[in-house]
Amino acid sequence: MKYKNIFFDLDDTLWAFSENARDTFIEMYEKYNLDYYFDSFEHFYAIYLKKNAELWVEYGKGHITKNQLNESRFFFPLQVVGCHDKELAQKYSKDFLETIPTKTKLMPHAKEILEYLFPNYRLYVLSNGFKELQNKKMQSAGIQDYFRKVVLSEDIGIMKPYPEIFHFAFSATHSEQRESIMIGDNWDADITGSHNIGMHQIYYNISNKKEFPFTPTFIISSLEELKKVL
């Protein structure tokens, strides 16, 4: 099949979210002297990551708002260690959200593969990330000009993997589903979501997943492998 439209997830598919987030949290941990409350940075970060994952599930289901997500995920680690200083949580969370989109790390071969694809395909971003962060991340990393449009779940209030966000993306970009393919690292949001509406998928298997409930159209372990697929 000759694809015309490529939809990329952003975080940990192109922009190295996990690395950039960790780097930013280390800065905040040191800046706000959080070692006063935690045994180590790893202690703090383990608590944050677990709660953050749980809250994103709730947010995806529409059970909590964006503000509730942000308030809870930053305040929760402090509460666990007996600190109930909401002002401290608000200060470091505001600082974190202002700092993280300035980070520039990309996934390996991200810029190289965008250069390769750009002349022959219409490239788009389809992301569940927050509107005020995603465009800034792309600008900081120097990849914004490769994309014709950035489609975000916040645009319609529905996140991947729900079908509505994919159909909205087709409409917003004037794309045909049969001529489009989704590339992402998140099995549920990117791959299951696109599979469920009959859209082809490329699973970027950075987690070295071994078992799959269905076989995706393509599986890659490096973005460089896209040259063999597209």
Image (spheres, rainbow, N blue to C red):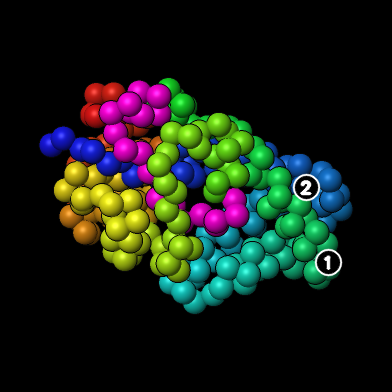
Which residue shows up at 46% across the image and 74% down it?
62
**Nearest the camera: 87 or 172?**
172
**Nearest the camera: 175 or 203?**
175
Which residue shows up at 66% across the image and 40% down it?
102
Q: Which residue is mark 2?
A: 29
Q: Is residue 109 above or below residue 60?
A: above
- Residue 122, given in percent of the width and then of the height, sits at 32, 38
14 left or right of 73 in image:
left
* Mark 2 Cα-neighbour bin, 10 Å: few <14, some 14–19, many ≥20: some
* Screen quadrant of the N terminus: top left
Mark 1–mark 2 distance (CA, rounded to whole Å): 15 Å
Extreme residue toward the bottom, this view: 63
**Nearest the camera: 37 or 103?**
103
Q: Is residue 67 shown to the viewer in this render? A: yes
Which residue shows up at 45% across the image and 68% down it?
157
Which residue shows up at 37% across the image and 59% down it?
160
Tag 2: amino acid: Tyr
> Foreground mark, 1 or 2?
1
Give the mark nearest the N terminus, 1 or 2: 2
Tag 1: amino acid: Glu
- Residue 145, given in percent of the width and then of the height, sits at 48, 34
Q: What residue range appears in magenta? A: 114-133
